[in-house]
Image (tube, rainbow, N blue to C red):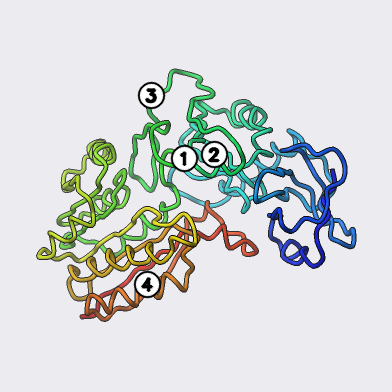
Amino acid sequence: MNIYLKKNQERRLLAGHLWVFSNEISSVEGEIVNGGICDIYSSQKKFIGRGYYNRNSLIAARILSHRKEEINKEFIKGRIINSKSRRESIDRTGNAYRIVNGDSDYIPGLIIDYFNGDYTFQIFSLGIENFKNEIIDVLKNDLNANTIIAKNNFQARKLENLELYEEIVYEKNEYDKSVFEIDNIRYSANLLEGQKTGFYLDQNENRFRIRRFINENTAVLDLFCNDGGFALNAAYSKANKIKAVDSSFKSIANAGENASINGFNNIEFIESDVFQFLKSNQDEKYELIILDPPSFTKSKKELPDAIKGYIELNSSSLKILKPNGILFTFSCSHYISESDFINMLRKSANFAGKKIQIIFYSNCSDDHPVLPSMPETLYLKSAAVRVLE
């Protein structure tokens, strides 16, 4: 199956982008098989890449290779193993990290996370769904998985006409929970029940980074604490007082369990809507606040309302920081650009009547690489903001 692009539509692809949109295609030759392998050509019939095709998706083709090589189990196996090896070449403390990050690892449509012998995966496209059994086989037989969990209950799959489901697809022994360690902190998580891939690994380095700003005199507030990662790192660093807030009873229970298995008893876990908590708790002041909300926007249309929400949260948080206090603040939507994020912080400081400095800016952990040619792979924005007065 050959795909030919309209005139001048190859420029973005030649610059390294991996997606072909349906409105960029001039014609398709050969038998059309949804999820099948295709070769992509410019309007001048110059070969661009080989990938998989889905005529029912807005992203009609996703490039796997810029060579005419066979796309089969050995190809997928090689990409997965090489991707995992790249992570293992980096000195890290712990046994939980992402091993495949979709487009950034040149396996568009596939996410795989590793948790001390247990694996979870997400599939975003029909083309890679056709290799699901091969992927499971690689994890089981080549990477010696104890448990493999498919975390495919997310709305993006509907764009590819894929069913939504979550299930254990392989278990060497009956699965209950995964126990793993990150930067000398132990976690216990039921990956089947957890959000996204079961546990948020993209914040590993940012969780570790807050330790630099904590001592025995530091009062810490962790907002949208989820399973407690930031609060646990604050406790590890001997913070004087820690409050961790989340609206989810399950998250609070999980975070409490994680604190218990580490012997941390200086965290107060609070089940509350974070917006309401901030409105009713403006008197107590903190040296350090972590603000890690969920994505407020799933489309560009929702962007203005999302930014309003971020401004409300960030301005309320800045108001309860002591002078020279630090706000670690995040946005996990790729629809919010870096400039949107910085501008949001400026407006938040104005609303709060505060002067601020951004003392550093970062993205995801190193196991979540960004493909420079694909802005879509840059989703997490984070900043450490110091309140001057």
Kindly check if marks 2 and 3 are in contact, taking CB atoms under 8 A apart as contact: no
**Badge nearest the viewer, 4 or 1:** 4
Q: What secondary structure is marked by label 4?
A: helix
Task: Please rate how many residues cluster around mark 3, counting C-alpha atoms within 10 Å: few if below 14, some from 14 to 19, many from 20.
Answer: few
Left or right, 287 with respect to 356, comes to left
For badge 4, the amino acid type reads Met
Q: Which residue is mark 4?
A: 344
Quick check: 172 above or below 336? above
Q: CA distance from mark 3 to mark 4?
A: 42 Å
Kindly check if marks 1 and 2 are in contact, taking CB atoms under 8 A apart as contact: yes
Q: Which residue is mark 3?
A: 176
Task: Please rate how many residues cluster around mark 4, counting C-alpha atoms within 10 Å: few if below 14, some from 14 to 19, many from 20.
Answer: many
Q: Give whichever of discs 2 and 4 has the lower sequence position.
A: 2
Q: CA distance from mark 1 to mark 2?
A: 7 Å
Q: Which residue is mark 2?
A: 122
Name the foreground residue: 113 vs 293. Answer: 293
Residue 282 lies, in percent from the top left, at 13, 64
Q: CA distance from mark 2 to mark 3?
A: 20 Å
Left or right, 308 with respect to 339, comes to left
- Identify the image quadrant of residue 329: bottom left
Kindly check if marks 3 and 1 are in contact, taking CB atoms under 8 A apart as contact: no
